[in-house]
Amino acid sequence: MSGLVPRPWIESLEVYEGGKSKTDGVAKAIKLSSNESALGPSPKAMEAYAAAVHTLHRYPDASYATLKQTIADKYGLEAKRIVCGIGSDEILKLACRAYVAPGDEVIYSRYGFMMYPIAAKSVGGVPVESEDKDYTADVDKILASVSDKTRLVFLANPNNPTGTYISVPEVERLHRGLPDNVLLVLDAAYAEFVAAQDYEAGIALASSASNVLMTRTFSKLYGLAALRLGWGYASADVAANLDRLRDPFNVPTPTELAGTAALTDIAFEEQAVAHNSHWLGWLTAEIGALGLQVVPSVTNFILIRFPGGEKSAEAANEFLLKKGYILRWLPGQGLGNCLRLTVGLEEDNRAVVALLKEFMDA
């Protein structure tokens, strides 16, 4: 043997690729590929972030106590059971590091977030893809995929990239069907956008069950994607285990201050939710009227199905890119006939619909 040899699963590990932000020949493209906030961050969050410049020579609070207490106060939680990370992505990986050994199985829904199999493989776990139903997680199929090697189940609820969700009773049924030694991770990155009465982000289940972890993010509604801030809530034991594994000072001071301020700017939060609700409905109706299928969404994005042939998703993607509009084409997830569109500003939404009409009429 000569030279360094990585763990056997590392060389085949895929690297997550975010949505494109540039397109050839267009100086200022309109990016609607990454489900980012249409309105951007709260003014209070920006002020707090800017003010932090005066303390950049100081290490952050390693316990991020202010941020945890603000989250706890907002949702009625126990601060000691909150763990924060570099986006919710870090918390997903921490969960795998804590509970998945090489050869253990990790279940996720077929059209679930593409980070799930990456997180599983990063620790030598075996991703197990469960079939969904109408672009929605299927509890029966997930439970049928459980084996004696299963250690973790990822459920994006609402789901990215389809925008669908499953109800509280279905989530509870899923949890009841899992063995006690399997961690159920409820990824609720888009929870703030959901108005459905039969939906709950997972706070109740994570509060009462010993094997449930709920994760949230500041990247979507709160518009702090560049700061990479997420949080999770679980039993005291699970939270403590994740906290042992995280890097020290993983939440920088400017990030903590901006996140804390964002949580307290209720007026801006309500404005962002109202904007999304209006334009999500408008885009769904207008694009559906073009003869395209829109998967019903409760998030800040929609998944658009194209008929194929000359009117394929790939052709539509190329057409839109040339016009300076970037959506997300996801052939790598088995969604080669779809484009995912983020809800944008009014002018962006109207322009995309006009361009899609032009493409379909050509």
Image: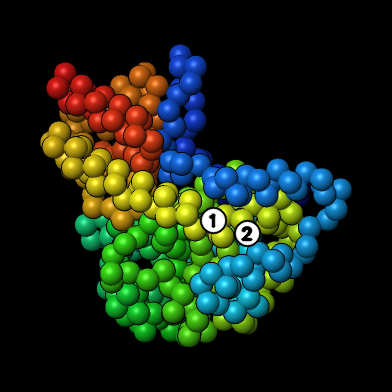
Of the image marks 2 and 1, the number of the one nearer the N terminus: 2
Q: Would residue 164 be visible to someone looking at this image? A: yes
Looking at this view, is 66 or 361 the one in front?
66
Question: Where on the picture, by quarter, is residue 320?
Answer: top left
Circle on res. 260:
2
Q: Are marks 2 and 1 in contact (CB under 8 Å)?
A: no
Q: Which residue is mark 1?
A: 265
Residue found at the very far front of the displayed protein: 267
Identify the residue at horizontal 49%, vertical 17% (top origin).
27
User: Horizontally, is 232 left or right of 5 in the view?
Assistant: left
Where residue 83 appears, as percent x and y from the top left, is 63, 69
Q: Residue at x 57, y 54 (%)?
A: 262
Q: In 3D space, how far apart are the residues under numbered discs 2 and 1 (Cα atoms)?
A: 9 Å
Quadrant (top left, top right, bottom left, bottom right) of the C terminus: top left
**Residue 237: x %, y % from top left:** 62, 82
Mark 2 Cα-neighbour bin, 10 Å: few <14, some 14–19, many ≥20: many
Q: Please, which residue is most extreme toward the right here?
A: 57
Inspect this view and state whether residue 89 appears.
Answer: no
Q: Determine whether the residue tagged by mark 1 lies in a helix, strand or loop.
A: loop
Tell me where residue 41 appears, x and y as whole percent: 54, 45
